[in-house]
Amino acid sequence: MFKGVYCNKFNINYNTIIKTTTLFFQPIPVSINNYWPIGFTSFVNIPITSFTLNYAVKVTSYPCYHDRVVFYQWLAGFIDGDGHFSVSTSIYPRLYIEQEPKNLSVLLFIQSMIGGTVHQRARDGCYVYNLAVRSKMITLLNGVNGNIRNSIRVPQFHRACALVNITPLPIIPLTLKNAWFTGFYDADGNVTAYFTKTPFIVFQVTNKFSINLDSFMTFFHGNIYHSKSNDVYKWKIGSRKDVLFLYSYFLLYPSMSHKHNRMSLVLELYHLVDQRAYKETADPILKNQWETLKVN
């Protein structure tokens, strides 16, 4: 989360049927300078609901995902990145999503929205989400219809639809008012801070095929590179202007994965860079904030 003056949380606990719901009001900047040379210009309070389900893990839900259209846009992106529609072992289609333990909260969030089961795989400790109930799969397939666009996932989606007599819609053209980008980023993206002589931030998204990354370059600029070491393609942005533009998109459709925690440090890093907190001659308070940021 933001440090110091950037973020204050006010916790209000309510007893609910689920267990305990904690409502966070988190100040988030909504207007910024072009290159962020000074700081924030305004704030808006966004309520963030957190709750627990089957596991002792906090699940965060943002208001935008209470809109079913937005939720299914995000989910389609997440499925495009890490999901799999299976039709080989059953007369009904199934959805599988595998995640590392640090992303368990994402699977629990999906479970809370559309049902399904989550279990831990013994051999590697990963968690697997499984949706197999026909009626729920029909709801899911209708929900993401038109937003599945991964070149591998589209044929799987079409086969799943055929089993339950759903007609696949043409792929909906992407815009910045679609949460798909966040879903795909939650599955296959990351943000890294490089503490070099002049520190900078890089956002990247990885996929086996470059065609599945083209839309990121179209809307957020950057470049696509081929990594020969593991034969994948990576879309990257590193300029402050591009990073802050992507960040402004994530304010509309926040990350639901563990990556949100690091992403929330972006503004603080730029603020401290502008204050030259990384210099040996920096003010001790700023220097301490910089060293703390590097640990995070």
Image (cartoon, helix red, strand yellow):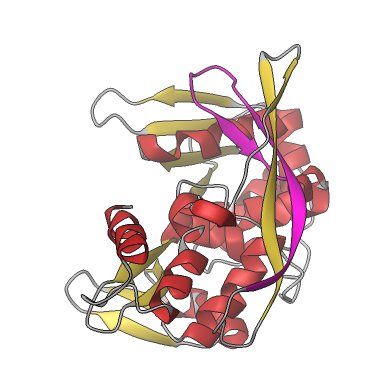
Residue 184 appears in view: yes
The residue positioned 47% from the left and 87% from the top of the image is 222
To which quarter of the image does residue 35 belong? bottom right
Q: Main secondary structure of the magenta part?
A: strand
Residue 281 x, y percent position in the rendering: 24, 77
Which residue is at the front of the view, 7 or 102? 7
Does residue 44 show up magenta in the picture? yes
Residue 10 x, y percent position in the rendering: 68, 35
- Region of the chain picked out in magenta, as a range: 40-62
The residue positioned 72% from the left and 62% from the top of the image is 252
Total numbered labels: 0
Residue 2 appears in view: no
Left/right of residue 140 with respect to residue 153 in the rendered view: right
Which residue is at the front of the view, 198 or 64? 198
The residue positioned 41% from the left and 82% from the top of the image is 238
Above or below, 239 against 6 in this view is below
Residue 81 x, y percent position in the rendering: 49, 58
Left/right of residue 114 with respect to residue 101 in the rendered view: right
Residue 114 x, y percent position in the rendering: 70, 33
The residue positioned 77% from the left and 58% from the top of the image is 44
Which residue is at the front of the view, 163 or 138? 138
Does residue 210 show up magenta in the picture? no
Which residue is at the front of the view, 58 or 173? 58
